[in-house]
Image: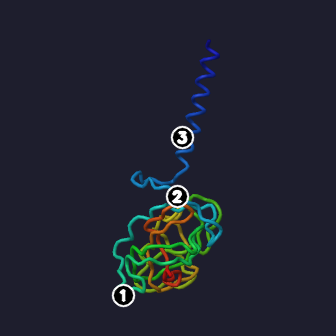
Amino acid sequence: MTKNLTLTWSATALTAALVLAGCASSDNDDPADPAPSTEHDDHGGHDDMEHPADGGPVPENMTEATDPEYPVGSEVTLTADHMEGMDGATATIVGAYETYTYSIDYTPTTGGDPVTDHQWVVQEELENPGEERLADGTEVTVTADHMEGMEGVTATIASSTDETVYVVDYEADGMTMTNHKWVVESEIEPTN
């Protein structure tokens, strides 16, 4: 009887450990963000990185674009390939901003392979960036949490642009992405 009880408790403990390990695999400390994620493909060094289905609000102090090429509410076609299914997807513009936008290289704080050419983070998602456009090669601390292991990381600016930058809603591979940050103007075309 004692042996059966011990086996039962051992099986229960093992099952509980596996369940807890699955729950603990997410580094998301914000219980208010239960949004599902989708994985990036190889584009821009995002393989095996997860991106939330809801990108959440933009950083404070963003400057709205006064006369963007694609106003809020416009339906557009994306030409960016940041994520699988994005290139060619129909999207709706939900925000347009004037700022400096950066592609960065970094190693996630959670470990793993380095991420190269992550597109995009904006000036307002960097710690104490100042007002001027930062030069390629500048090391910065990232305050954005677009993907697991990004927030707080030291990154290197790979390139930058001062194009209008947009937040979009779109559907790809059967998943609806809301408030996706960021897509720059050259990665958008009018919908035919």
Q: Which residue is mark 2?
A: 37
Q: How far apart, in angstroms, are the residues tagged by discs 1 and 2?
A: 33 Å
Q: Earlier in the sequence, mark 1 or mark 3?
A: 3
Q: Which residue is mark 3?
A: 20
Tell me the quarter of the picture where residue 136 sits: bottom right
Mark 3 or 2, closer to the camera: 2
Q: In terms of secondary structure, where does tag 3 sit? A: helix
What numbered label is drawn on residue 40?
none
The relative height of residue 60 versus residue 27 in the rendered view (above or below) is below
In the rendered structure, are the residues bearing label 1 and label 2 in contact, judged by CB atoms less than 8 Å apart? no
- Which of these two is toward me, 66 or 111? 66
**How many callouts does the rendering have?**
3
The relative height of residue 23 versus residue 160 in the rendered view (above or below) is above
Q: In terms of secondary structure, where does tag 2 sit? A: strand
Amino acid type of the residue tagged 1 in the rendering: Asp
**Residue at image x 58%, y 80%?**
158
Amino acid type of the residue tagged 2 in the rendering: Ser
The image shows residue 65 at horizontal and vertical percentages of: 37, 83
Mark 1 or 3, closer to the camera: 1
**Residue at image x 63%, y 70%?**
45
